[in-house]
Image: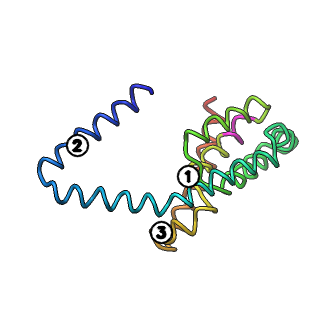
């Protein structure tokens, strides 16, 4: 565990302790609500992880790299971003996955577009997000996230 994660855990526990000290009833009620929401999302999260495994089994990174490297940079970036929108992937899965793609020969710009859409845009998670936040918010958030993912990829291409 890195120092940043450890600091977050310690901070969380400190603030939870303060909350518990101030109002035990409300803190217990909030924890029950949080665990209830977590249980409700477990099936969706597991299906996302399963989908990622299936996609990587059907499309190995070397094949993805071969396809992307044959395209122009802009087309490859857009296609990589579209692939990334298939699901919303937690960062602890996305970074190693993109590292595998870069090592397989995928360029930086398409890789960054893929990474940012993996972590910011989610077609598979749209129904869950729609249920929690509403259609308008979910559509606007996903659309803006896709646009900014392309912009971030292009800027990273200039920087790196």
Please tell me whether mark 3 sits on a helix, a strand or a loop.
Answer: helix
For mark 2, what is the residue? 15
- Image quarter for residue 26? bottom left
Please tell me whether mark 2 sits on a helix, a strand or a loop.
Answer: helix
For residue 30, side relative to residue 98 (left or right)? left
Please tell me whether mark 1 sits on a helix, a strand or a loop.
Answer: helix
Residue at (69% x, 50% y) in the render? 52
- First in residue order: circle 1 vs circle 2: 2
Residue 90 percent location from the top left of the image: 55, 46
**145 vs 47, nearest the viewer:** 47
**72 vs 50, nearest the viewer:** 50
Mark toward the viewer: 1 or 2: 2
Residue 76 percent location from the top left of the image: 78, 46
Residue at (64% x, 29% y) in the render? 160
Q: Is residue 128 above or below residue 154?
A: below
For mark 3, what is the residue? 137
- First in residue order: circle 1 vs circle 3: 1
- Image quarter for residue 44? bottom right
Query: What is the CA distance from the residue labelled 3 to the residue labelled 2?
Result: 30 Å
Query: What is the CA distance from the residue labelled 1 to the residue labelled 2?
Result: 28 Å
Of the 4 image quadrants, the one containing the N terminus is top left
Mark toward the viewer: 3 or 2: 2
Residue at (17% x, 49% y) in the render? 20
> What numbered label is drawn on residue 120?
1
Q: Which residues are magenta?
A: 107-111
- Image quarter for residue 8? top left
The extreme left residue here reads 22
């Amino acid at each position: 565990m890195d120092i940043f994660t450890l600091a977050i855990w310690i901070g969380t526990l400190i603030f939870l302790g303060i909350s518990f000290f101030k109002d035990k009833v409300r803190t217990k009620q909030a924890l029950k609500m949080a665990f209830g929401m977590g249980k409700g999302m477990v099936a969706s999260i597991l299906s996302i992880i399963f989908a990622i495994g299936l996609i990587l089994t059907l499309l190995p990174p070397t094949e993805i790299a071969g396809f992307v490297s044959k395209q122009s940079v802009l087309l490859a970036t857009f296609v990589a971003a579209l692939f990334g929108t298939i699901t919303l992937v937690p960062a602890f899965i996305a970074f190693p996955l993109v590292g595998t793609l870069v090592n397989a020969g995928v360029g930086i710009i398409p890789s960054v577009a893929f990474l940012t859409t993996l972590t910011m845009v989610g077609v598979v998670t749209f129904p869950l997000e729609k249920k929690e936040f509403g259609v308008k918010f979910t559509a606007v958030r996903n659309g803006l996230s896709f646009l900014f993912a392309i912009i971030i990829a292009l800027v990273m291409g200039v920087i790196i």
